[in-house]
Amino acid sequence: MKINWFKYAAPMNFYSLAGKMIPFFWIAAVVFTAIGLYIGFFKTPDAIDNGMKQYYRIIFVHVAASWMAMWLYGVMVFWALIGVIFNTRISYMLASATSITGTLMTIIALISGAIWGKTSWGTWWDWDPKLTTFLILLFVYIGYIALQSAIEDTRRSDKASALLALVGLAIVPVIYYAVNCPDPNQCASLHQESSLKRIEPNILTAMLVTTLGFWMYSFATILMRTKNIILQRERKTNWVANLPEVIAGGKK
Amino acid sequence: MSDFFHMGGYAAYIWSVMGVALFFMLLEPFLLVLKRRSILQEIKRNKRLEERRARDKGKT
Protein backbone atom coordinates (compact mmCIF):
# COMPACT_ATOMS: atom_id res chain seq x y z
CA MET A 1 0.00 0.00 0.00
CA LYS A 2 1.33 3.35 -0.95
CA ILE A 3 0.55 6.25 1.31
CA ASN A 4 0.89 9.74 0.02
CA TRP A 5 2.38 11.46 3.08
CA PHE A 6 2.13 14.91 1.59
CA LYS A 7 -1.61 14.49 1.37
CA TYR A 8 -1.71 14.67 5.16
CA ALA A 9 0.39 17.81 5.19
CA ALA A 10 -2.78 19.61 4.17
CA PRO A 11 -4.52 20.71 7.39
CA MET A 12 -7.91 19.60 6.07
CA ASN A 13 -6.79 16.00 5.51
CA PHE A 14 -4.78 15.90 8.69
CA TYR A 15 -7.77 17.11 10.68
CA SER A 16 -9.94 14.17 9.62
CA LEU A 17 -7.11 11.64 9.96
CA ALA A 18 -6.32 12.85 13.49
CA GLY A 19 -10.00 12.67 14.40
CA LYS A 20 -10.05 9.00 13.44
CA MET A 21 -6.86 8.18 15.33
CA ILE A 22 -7.56 9.91 18.64
CA PRO A 23 -10.01 7.30 20.08
CA PHE A 24 -7.53 4.48 19.43
CA PHE A 25 -4.75 6.35 21.18
CA TRP A 26 -7.02 6.98 24.17
CA ILE A 27 -7.94 3.30 24.45
CA ALA A 28 -4.29 2.27 24.11
CA ALA A 29 -3.27 4.88 26.71
CA VAL A 30 -5.73 3.61 29.31
CA VAL A 31 -5.00 -0.06 28.62
CA PHE A 32 -1.20 0.19 28.70
CA THR A 33 -1.06 2.48 31.72
CA ALA A 34 -3.46 0.19 33.61
CA ILE A 35 -1.46 -2.94 32.75
CA GLY A 36 1.83 -1.22 33.57
CA LEU A 37 0.63 -0.03 36.96
CA TYR A 38 -1.03 -3.38 37.68
CA ILE A 39 2.29 -5.17 37.17
CA GLY A 40 4.01 -2.42 39.11
CA PHE A 41 1.77 -2.71 42.13
CA PHE A 42 0.88 -6.39 42.25
CA LYS A 43 3.63 -8.35 40.54
CA THR A 44 6.68 -6.74 42.11
CA PRO A 45 8.46 -7.30 45.44
CA ASP A 46 7.79 -4.92 48.34
CA ALA A 47 11.44 -4.04 48.68
CA ILE A 48 14.41 -4.25 46.36
CA ASP A 49 17.98 -5.36 46.98
CA ASN A 50 19.59 -1.98 47.35
CA GLY A 51 17.52 -1.18 50.44
CA MET A 52 14.69 0.66 48.73
CA LYS A 53 11.29 -0.03 50.22
CA GLN A 54 7.82 0.31 48.75
CA TYR A 55 8.35 3.94 47.85
CA TYR A 56 10.31 2.80 44.81
CA ARG A 57 6.87 2.36 43.17
CA ILE A 58 6.94 6.10 42.58
CA ILE A 59 9.32 5.38 39.69
CA PHE A 60 6.60 3.91 37.50
CA VAL A 61 5.09 7.34 37.09
CA HIS A 62 8.29 9.31 37.63
CA VAL A 63 10.37 7.48 35.02
CA ALA A 64 7.56 7.40 32.47
CA ALA A 65 6.94 11.15 32.83
CA SER A 66 10.67 11.98 32.75
CA TRP A 67 11.27 9.93 29.64
CA MET A 68 8.27 11.51 27.97
CA ALA A 69 9.47 15.00 28.93
CA MET A 70 12.76 14.37 27.13
CA TRP A 71 11.39 12.44 24.15
CA LEU A 72 8.62 14.92 23.53
CA TYR A 73 11.26 17.60 23.36
CA GLY A 74 12.86 15.55 20.59
CA VAL A 75 9.49 15.16 18.87
CA MET A 76 8.92 18.91 19.10
CA VAL A 77 12.34 19.66 17.58
CA PHE A 78 11.70 17.09 14.85
CA TRP A 79 8.49 18.80 13.75
CA ALA A 80 10.04 22.24 14.08
CA LEU A 81 12.91 21.11 11.87
CA ILE A 82 10.56 19.59 9.27
CA GLY A 83 8.67 22.88 9.34
CA VAL A 84 11.84 24.89 8.71
CA ILE A 85 12.97 22.59 5.88
CA PHE A 86 9.71 21.93 4.02
CA ASN A 87 7.80 24.98 5.21
CA THR A 88 4.73 22.86 5.98
CA ARG A 89 2.26 24.57 8.27
CA ILE A 90 1.07 21.32 9.82
CA SER A 91 4.57 20.53 11.17
CA TYR A 92 4.69 23.84 13.01
CA MET A 93 1.26 23.15 14.45
CA LEU A 94 2.40 19.72 15.64
CA ALA A 95 5.53 21.22 17.21
CA SER A 96 3.47 23.76 19.04
CA ALA A 97 0.94 21.14 20.18
CA THR A 98 3.77 18.93 21.48
CA SER A 99 5.28 21.70 23.60
CA ILE A 100 2.32 21.84 26.00
CA THR A 101 2.16 18.08 26.64
CA GLY A 102 5.96 18.11 27.04
CA THR A 103 5.71 20.87 29.63
CA LEU A 104 3.05 18.91 31.50
CA MET A 105 5.23 15.79 31.55
CA THR A 106 8.17 17.85 32.82
CA ILE A 107 6.00 19.20 35.64
CA ILE A 108 4.81 15.69 36.59
CA ALA A 109 8.43 14.48 36.50
CA LEU A 110 9.59 17.34 38.74
CA ILE A 111 6.79 16.97 41.30
CA SER A 112 7.03 13.17 41.47
CA GLY A 113 10.81 13.57 41.63
CA ALA A 114 10.52 15.93 44.59
CA ILE A 115 8.30 13.45 46.42
CA TRP A 116 10.74 10.69 45.56
CA GLY A 117 13.59 12.85 46.85
CA LYS A 118 11.79 13.42 50.13
CA THR A 119 11.43 9.68 50.80
CA SER A 120 14.70 8.55 49.33
CA TRP A 121 17.19 11.31 50.12
CA GLY A 122 15.27 13.22 52.78
CA THR A 123 14.96 16.44 50.81
CA TRP A 124 12.38 17.81 48.36
CA TRP A 125 14.91 19.56 46.22
CA ASP A 126 18.64 19.71 45.73
CA TRP A 127 20.76 21.44 43.12
CA ASP A 128 21.95 18.11 41.90
CA PRO A 129 22.91 18.00 38.17
CA LYS A 130 19.94 15.87 37.14
CA LEU A 131 17.38 17.95 38.97
CA THR A 132 18.90 21.23 37.85
CA THR A 133 19.09 20.25 34.18
CA PHE A 134 15.49 19.08 34.32
CA LEU A 135 14.43 22.42 35.72
CA ILE A 136 16.23 24.07 32.81
CA LEU A 137 14.29 21.81 30.43
CA LEU A 138 11.07 23.16 31.97
CA PHE A 139 12.28 26.72 31.37
CA VAL A 140 13.17 25.93 27.76
CA TYR A 141 9.66 24.56 27.19
CA ILE A 142 8.13 27.63 28.84
CA GLY A 143 10.42 29.85 26.77
CA TYR A 144 9.20 28.19 23.57
CA ILE A 145 5.54 28.63 24.53
CA ALA A 146 6.09 32.23 25.64
CA LEU A 147 7.92 33.17 22.45
CA GLN A 148 5.23 31.58 20.32
CA SER A 149 2.45 33.51 22.02
CA ALA A 150 4.44 36.76 22.10
CA ILE A 151 4.60 37.12 18.30
CA GLU A 152 1.26 37.89 16.66
CA ASP A 153 2.10 36.82 13.12
CA THR A 154 1.85 33.01 13.08
CA ARG A 155 4.41 32.51 10.32
CA ARG A 156 7.03 34.49 12.18
CA SER A 157 6.20 33.04 15.59
CA ASP A 158 6.41 29.51 14.15
CA LYS A 159 9.86 30.15 12.71
CA ALA A 160 11.24 31.99 15.71
CA SER A 161 10.06 29.38 18.21
CA ALA A 162 11.34 26.56 15.97
CA LEU A 163 14.81 28.10 16.16
CA LEU A 164 14.54 28.42 19.94
CA ALA A 165 13.55 24.73 20.14
CA LEU A 166 16.63 23.79 18.11
CA VAL A 167 18.95 25.82 20.34
CA GLY A 168 17.34 24.33 23.44
CA LEU A 169 18.10 20.84 22.15
CA ALA A 170 21.54 21.30 23.72
CA ILE A 171 20.04 20.59 27.16
CA VAL A 172 18.87 17.04 26.30
CA PRO A 173 22.31 15.33 26.15
CA VAL A 174 23.27 17.22 29.30
CA ILE A 175 20.32 15.68 31.15
CA TYR A 176 21.19 12.28 29.76
CA TYR A 177 24.78 12.45 30.95
CA ALA A 178 23.76 13.93 34.28
CA VAL A 179 21.94 10.70 35.13
CA ASN A 180 24.16 8.27 33.22
CA CYS A 181 27.36 9.78 34.51
CA PRO A 182 30.38 7.76 33.37
CA ASP A 183 32.22 8.30 36.65
CA PRO A 184 29.95 8.95 39.64
CA ASN A 185 32.87 10.30 41.68
CA GLN A 186 33.19 13.21 39.32
CA CYS A 187 29.52 14.01 39.11
CA ALA A 188 28.60 14.17 42.81
CA SER A 189 25.07 13.25 41.84
CA LEU A 190 22.37 12.57 44.40
CA HIS A 191 20.03 11.16 41.79
CA GLN A 192 20.21 7.39 41.36
CA GLU A 193 22.09 6.24 38.34
CA SER A 194 19.80 4.94 35.68
CA SER A 195 20.30 1.17 35.92
CA LEU A 196 18.03 -0.53 33.44
CA LYS A 197 20.23 -3.61 33.15
CA ARG A 198 20.41 -4.45 36.85
CA ILE A 199 16.73 -4.00 37.53
CA GLU A 200 14.19 -6.69 38.47
CA PRO A 201 12.46 -7.95 35.25
CA ASN A 202 8.91 -7.22 36.46
CA ILE A 203 9.81 -3.73 37.63
CA LEU A 204 11.37 -3.04 34.25
CA THR A 205 8.31 -4.40 32.44
CA ALA A 206 5.99 -2.25 34.57
CA MET A 207 8.12 0.81 33.82
CA LEU A 208 8.22 0.18 30.08
CA VAL A 209 4.51 -0.62 29.75
CA THR A 210 3.51 2.45 31.77
CA THR A 211 5.80 4.53 29.57
CA LEU A 212 4.11 3.09 26.49
CA GLY A 213 0.78 4.16 28.01
CA PHE A 214 2.16 7.67 28.53
CA TRP A 215 3.30 7.72 24.89
CA MET A 216 -0.22 6.89 23.74
CA TYR A 217 -1.62 9.53 26.08
CA SER A 218 0.79 12.08 24.58
CA PHE A 219 -0.22 11.16 21.02
CA ALA A 220 -3.89 11.51 21.92
CA THR A 221 -3.56 14.93 23.56
CA ILE A 222 -1.11 16.24 20.95
CA LEU A 223 -3.52 15.29 18.16
CA MET A 224 -6.45 16.84 20.03
CA ARG A 225 -4.49 20.06 20.44
CA THR A 226 -3.36 20.00 16.80
CA LYS A 227 -7.01 19.76 15.76
CA ASN A 228 -7.77 22.79 17.91
CA ILE A 229 -4.89 24.74 16.38
CA ILE A 230 -6.04 23.79 12.86
CA LEU A 231 -9.57 25.00 13.60
CA GLN A 232 -8.25 28.25 14.99
CA ARG A 233 -5.89 28.97 12.13
CA GLU A 234 -8.21 27.82 9.35
CA ARG A 235 -11.43 29.23 10.79
CA LYS A 236 -12.06 31.41 7.74
CA THR A 237 -11.78 28.63 5.16
CA ASN A 238 -14.64 26.91 3.40
CA TRP A 239 -13.79 23.42 4.53
CA VAL A 240 -14.06 24.45 8.19
CA ALA A 241 -17.39 26.16 7.51
CA ASN A 242 -18.67 22.91 6.00
CA LEU A 243 -17.46 20.60 8.77
CA PRO A 244 -20.30 18.54 10.29
CA GLU A 245 -19.44 19.86 13.77
CA VAL A 246 -19.80 23.42 12.51
CA ILE A 247 -23.06 22.81 10.61
CA ALA A 248 -24.65 20.68 13.35
CA GLY A 249 -26.48 22.74 15.93
CA GLY A 250 -25.89 25.92 13.99
CA LYS A 251 -29.28 27.33 14.90
CA LYS A 252 -30.34 30.74 13.74
CA MET B 1 -6.58 -4.62 51.04
CA SER B 2 -5.79 -1.95 53.61
CA ASP B 3 -2.25 -3.34 53.60
CA PHE B 4 -2.11 -2.53 49.94
CA PHE B 5 -3.17 1.09 50.42
CA HIS B 6 -0.85 1.44 53.38
CA MET B 7 2.17 0.73 51.12
CA GLY B 8 4.45 -0.16 54.01
CA GLY B 9 4.09 3.32 55.52
CA TYR B 10 4.82 5.16 52.27
CA ALA B 11 1.18 5.58 51.30
CA ALA B 12 1.24 9.39 51.46
CA TYR B 13 4.18 9.61 49.07
CA ILE B 14 3.11 6.95 46.59
CA TRP B 15 -0.54 7.93 46.37
CA SER B 16 0.22 11.62 46.12
CA VAL B 17 2.48 10.92 43.12
CA MET B 18 -0.29 8.85 41.49
CA GLY B 19 -2.77 11.61 42.36
CA VAL B 20 -0.64 14.38 40.85
CA ALA B 21 -0.17 12.41 37.62
CA LEU B 22 -3.87 11.54 37.42
CA PHE B 23 -4.87 15.14 38.13
CA PHE B 24 -2.73 16.62 35.35
CA MET B 25 -3.55 13.85 32.89
CA LEU B 26 -7.28 14.40 33.35
CA LEU B 27 -6.98 18.18 33.42
CA GLU B 28 -5.19 18.37 30.06
CA PRO B 29 -7.83 16.54 27.94
CA PHE B 30 -10.60 18.34 29.86
CA LEU B 31 -9.14 21.74 28.96
CA LEU B 32 -8.64 20.59 25.37
CA VAL B 33 -12.33 19.70 25.06
CA LEU B 34 -13.37 23.06 26.56
CA LYS B 35 -11.07 24.86 24.15
CA ARG B 36 -12.48 22.95 21.18
CA ARG B 37 -16.03 23.89 22.20
CA SER B 38 -15.20 27.57 22.48
CA ILE B 39 -13.43 27.60 19.10
CA LEU B 40 -16.36 25.83 17.41
CA GLN B 41 -18.82 28.26 19.01
CA GLU B 42 -16.87 31.23 17.73
CA ILE B 43 -16.71 29.77 14.23
CA LYS B 44 -20.47 29.16 14.26
CA ARG B 45 -21.16 32.68 15.50
CA ASN B 46 -19.03 34.22 12.77
CA LYS B 47 -20.68 32.02 10.16
CA ARG B 48 -24.15 33.14 11.23
CA LEU B 49 -23.08 36.79 11.21
CA GLU B 50 -21.75 36.45 7.72
CA GLU B 51 -24.88 34.71 6.46
CA ARG B 52 -27.04 37.47 7.93
CA ARG B 53 -24.85 40.11 6.34
CA ALA B 54 -25.12 38.40 2.96
CA ARG B 55 -28.90 38.19 3.28
CA ASP B 56 -29.22 41.88 4.23
CA LYS B 57 -27.18 42.81 1.24
CA GLY B 58 -29.59 40.84 -1.01
CA LYS B 59 -32.60 42.81 0.33
CA THR B 60 -31.35 46.31 -0.45
Image: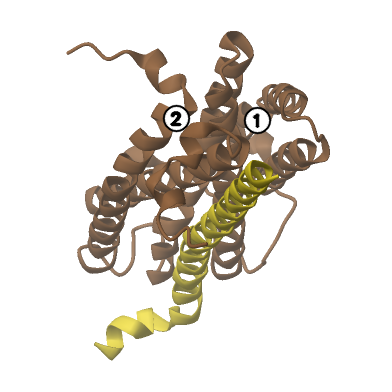
Chain colours: A brown, B yellow
Q: Residues within 10 Å of mark 1 (few under 14, many from 20)?
A: some
Label 2 chain ID: A
Residue at 64 percent of width and 37 percent of height: A185
Q: Which image quarter: residue B11?
A: bottom left
Report the disc number at residue A174: 1
Residue at 57 percent of width and 44 percent of height: A102
- Measured as percent of width and height from the top left, residue A166 is found at 68, 22
Label 1 chain ID: A
Secondary structure at badge 2 equals helix
Secondary structure at badge 1 equals helix
- In the visual, does A139 lie left or right of A86? right
View extreme (left): residue? A1
**CB under 8 Å between discs 1 and 2:** no
On the question of residue B13 being in view, the answer is: yes
Viewer-side residue, A7 vs A41: A7
Q: Work out how far the residue at label 1 is from the one at label 2, CA to CA, in angstroms.
A: 39 Å
- In the visual, does A10 lie left or right of A4? right
Report the disc number at residue A43: none
Labels 1 and 2 positioned on one and the same chain = yes
- Residue beneath disc 2: A12
View extreme (front): residue? B60
- In the visual, does B49 lie left or right of A194? right
User: What count of labels does the image hold?
Assistant: 2
On the question of residue A109 being in view, the answer is: no
Image: B18 above or below A136: below
Q: Which residue type carries mark 2?
A: Met
Q: Which residue type carries mark 1?
A: Val
- Measured as percent of width and height from the top left, residue B1 is found at 24, 87
Q: Earlier in the sequence, mark 1 or mark 2?
A: 2
- Measured as percent of width and height from the top left, residue B31 is found at 55, 61
